[in-house]
Image: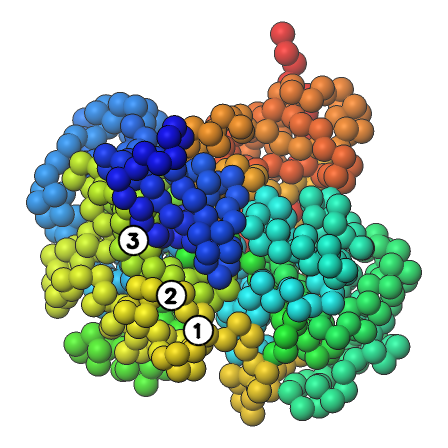
């Protein structure tokens, strides 16, 4: 870091990694970020985790893309085969004029043949304005809704259940609201590693006597602070949650007044829960009925209880059912809409909330307004200057990849996403991308996905951008450029605008603030939130007046559903898509590590983070390792029905003896070579959290 006083400028922005949305001050000298400090944002109050504090230098990495690139005519066949240190074997440098001209002509040609032959993936790493423009690019430019982003891979099932049952896809309370709770449930989440600053609030909550209940098949770090740890069998979430609710019903611990005033379908839920006794469910979940009773009484008797969940809940074929159970648990105990109570899916990426709000999803326009409504579409096309687009819900991430593989989608525009690492059964996705006639990738590095590109457009990192982002708390914050992008790289919104103009869209944005102003015309969530306000403050939506900093808690006076009532949707037990068997006897789950972010493209290029966690590794229980004759530090082979990887073993007593945990940040041992692409029927999210796997020792000669 050097001399902490030795900088030229200070710029306020927001951390580019997780959905906590920590505010930062960037200290810059000679157009280089020297160090980062946490400042007083509402979500972090000056705190930062290791990624926010030390993970900034990737923006100055030698692998940054600095000029547009075009695939060479004599390049080898498309595959994961480009050396990031020498791109010249596959790509030649081009001017922006040439690259944009080629991209636009290619898109127009495909559109003339069949508009549905083009699809787009936007990014939760980009700003709200960039997400809005990207979905508009596909909808206005190609007249359909085949546009999606990585929310499909993280909380799509949570959003589906929330919209269905409470009428809104966002959290009902900020995570900071835990300060007013008596009891907090954290399920299927590992905040100490994945939302580290949020985890500090959970730890403080236990220090002042709050009761923490942690539920996870893995013994996540937060268990050390928990009053109750329920380490249930993988995939048994619904059985366990229904048994907790069965106790609340049987012992009449529910809040009759709240249920009567604010909900519907209670009788059906009550009848459904009858068979889910703790004793009957123990066989599935493995949790002692006495502990289920204790937890049910603790949560139901709390003055205020709050529920947090993560991808351990959402990434299952029954992910929507898992969230339905959590919503029902909160509703039956009257734990929505009051201080210290609520439902909070901990959102993953820094702007996955904002990108979803901005309509970067195939079934909804901005503010979750359905594409099937003629009135809704008209309200947008009126603002966009006429035309119409399909009233059919579009294809999701994995459905688009399948259509690429089948040859029906021939062109893709991918902005800042890395599906050649992040998709389930990723070799299938890579094979699909190799078939595309036209692949335009806009990014800051030659990602695994960019290996397959025909045209690469060099874009900007968050610390080089102007715009807004929205965190897991519904807090809208400004990001600002602290440094200029390297070489000829440009901000993503400006690239999309020029490409839009070149395919004939009547776009005339001069500044990103004009995009924000347009968003406000059709997004009630942004009422009272202005660009000017965001210059000096963070505003939580909804904000009820120009002076209101925003509502940390919503739905105290009813839900945005018919008659203002939330709904109980009973959930049945659905087994995981593939059961362990003689060939694949163990269970694999995947996730993140503290030091690495998602597909690793940023954090593995960050010196400190890469130094702390340099090598692909997986974790197993020490007894399992002994049984297999494997020492920690040795290499092992993991195989599923999709493929195999070789990876270093680590011992971790918190992992169940029949499980293996594999982080998904490492290309050399890509977890998603192994994962199951089966999807939840509602949220269309893949079952990343459960694959039947074989673990073998590799002979080390
Ligand atoms: Fe960044 Fe999340 Fe860490 Fe905050 S908690 S510094 S937003 S990675």
Q: Is residue 468 left or right of residue 553?
A: left
Q: Residues within 10 Å of mark 1 (few under 14, many from 20)?
A: some
148, 329: nearer the viewer? 329
Instruction: Estimate the spatial distance between the alpha carbons at disc 2 and disc 1, rounded to whole Å.
Output: 8 Å
407, 563: nearer the viewer? 563
Q: Is residue 244 left or right of residue 481?
A: right
Residue 509 visible in rendering = yes
Quadrant in which the N terminus is drawn: top left
Name the residue located 46 percent from the left edge and 56 percent from the top edge.
40
* Secondary structure under the numbered disc 2 in the rendered image: loop
Q: Is residue 615 left or right of residue 270?
A: left
Residue 17 visible in rendering = no
Q: Which residue is mark 2?
A: 537
* Secondary structure under the numbered disc 3 in the rendered image: loop
Which is more foreground, mark 2 or mark 3?
A: 2
Q: Between disc 2 and disc 3, whose residue precedes?
A: 3
Q: Which residue is mark 3?
A: 480
Instruction: Indicate the position of residue 605 as horizontal and vertical percent values.
Output: 40, 31
Instruction: Indicate the position of residue 299 as horizontal and vertical percent values.
Output: 78, 68
Q: Are dots 2 and 1 in contact, CB under 8 Å?
A: yes
- Reply above or below: 176 against 437: below
Instruction: Estimate the spatial distance between the alpha carbons at disc 2 and disc 3, rounded to whole Å.
Output: 13 Å
Q: Which numbered tag is attached to residue 68?
A: none
Q: Between disc 2 and disc 1, whose residue precedes?
A: 2
Instruction: Estimate the spatial distance between the alpha carbons at disc 1 and disc 3, rounded to whole Å.
Output: 21 Å
Q: Between disc 1 and disc 3, whose residue precedes?
A: 3
Give the total of numbered labels: 3
- Reply above or below: 219 against 332: above
- Reply above or below: 107 against 296: above
Q: Which residue is mark 1?
A: 549
């Amino acid at each position: 870091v050097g001399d902490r006083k030795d900088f030229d400028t200070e710029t306020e922005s927001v951390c580019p990694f997780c959905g906590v949305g920590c505010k930062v001050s960037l200290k810059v000298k000679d157009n280089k970020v020297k160090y980062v400090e946490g400042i007083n944002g509402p979500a972090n109050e000056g705190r930062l985790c290791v990624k926010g504090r030390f993970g900034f230098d990737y923006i100055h990495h030698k692998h940054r893309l600095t000029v547009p690139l075009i695939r060479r005519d004599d390049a080898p066949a498309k595959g994961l085969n480009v050396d990031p240190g020498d791109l010249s074997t596959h790509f030649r440098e081009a001017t922006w004029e040439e690259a944009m001209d080629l991209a636009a002509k290619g898109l127009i040609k495909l559109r003339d043949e069949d508009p549905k032959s083009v699809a787009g993936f936007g990014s939760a790493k980009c700003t709200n304005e960039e997400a809005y423009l990207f979905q508009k690019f596909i909808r206005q430019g190609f007249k359909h809704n085949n546009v999606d982003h990585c929310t499909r891979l993280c909380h799509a099932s949570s959003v589906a259940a929330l919209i269905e049952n409470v009428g809104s896809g966002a959290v009902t309370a900020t995570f900071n609201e835990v300060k007013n709770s008596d009891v907090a449930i954290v399920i299927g989440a590992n905040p100490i590693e994945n939302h580290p600053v949020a985890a500090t609030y959970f730890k403080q909550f236990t220090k002042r006597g709050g009761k923490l209940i942690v539920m996870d098949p893995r013994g996540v770090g937060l268990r050390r602070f928990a009053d109750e740890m329920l380490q249930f069998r993988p995939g048994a979430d619904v059985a366990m949650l229904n048994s907790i609710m069965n106790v609340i019903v049987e012992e009449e611990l529910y809040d009759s007044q709240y249920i009567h005033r604010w909900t519907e379908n209670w009788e059906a839920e009550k009848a459904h829960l009858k068979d889910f006794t703790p004793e009957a469910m123990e066989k599935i979940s493995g949790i002692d009925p006495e502990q289920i009773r204790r937890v049910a009484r603790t949560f139901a008797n709390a003055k205020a209880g709050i529920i947090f969940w993560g991808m351990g809940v959402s990434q299952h074929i029954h992910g929507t059912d898992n969230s339905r159970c959590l919503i029902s648990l909160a509703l039956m105990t009257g734990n929505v809409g009051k201080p210290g109570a609520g439902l909070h899916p901990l959102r993953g990426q820094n702007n996955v909330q904002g990108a979803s709000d901005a309509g970067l999803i195939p079934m909804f326009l901005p503010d979750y307004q359905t594409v099937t409504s003629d009135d809704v579409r008209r309200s947008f096309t009126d603002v966009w200057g006429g035309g119409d687009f399909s009233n059919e819900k579009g294809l999701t991430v994995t459905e688009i990849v399948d259509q690429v593989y089948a040859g029906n989608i021939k062109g893709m525009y991918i902005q800042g996403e890395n599906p050649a690492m992040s998709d389930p059964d990723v070799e299938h996705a890579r094979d699909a991308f190799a078939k595309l006639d036209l692949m335009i990738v806009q990014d800051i590095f030659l990602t695994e996905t960019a290996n397959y590109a025909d045209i690469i457009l060099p874009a900007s990192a968050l610390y080089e951008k102007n715009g807004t982002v929205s965190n897991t708390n519904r807090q809208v914050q400004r990001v600002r450029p602290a440094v200029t992008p390297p070489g000829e790289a440009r901000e993503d919104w400006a690239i999309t605008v020029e490409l839009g103009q070149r395919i004939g869209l009547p776009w005339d944005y001069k500044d990103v603030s004009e995009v924000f102003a347009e968003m406000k015309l059709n997004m009630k969530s942004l009422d009272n939130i202005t660009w000017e306000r965001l210059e000096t403050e963070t505003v939580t939506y909804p904000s009820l007046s120009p002076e209101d900093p925003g509502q940390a808690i919503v739905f105290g006076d009813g839900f945005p559903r018919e008659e203002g009532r939330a709904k109980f949707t009973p959930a049945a037990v659905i087994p995981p898509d593939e059961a362990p068997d003689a060939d694949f006897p163990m269970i694999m789950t995947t996730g993140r590590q503290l030091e690495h972010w998602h597909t690793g493209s940023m954090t593995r290029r960050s010196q400190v983070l890469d130094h702390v966690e340099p090598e692909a590794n997986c974790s197993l229980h020490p007894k399992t390792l002994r049984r297999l004759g494997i020492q920690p530090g040795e290499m092992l082979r993991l195989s599923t029905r999709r493929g195999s990887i070789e990876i270093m073993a680590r011992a971790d007593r918190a992992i169940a003896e029949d499980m293996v945990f594999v982080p998904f940040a490492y290309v050399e041992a890509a977890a998603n070579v192994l994962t199951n692409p089966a999807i939840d029927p509602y949220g269309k999210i893949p079952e990343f959290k459960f694959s039947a796997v074989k673990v073998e020792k590799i002979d080390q000669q």
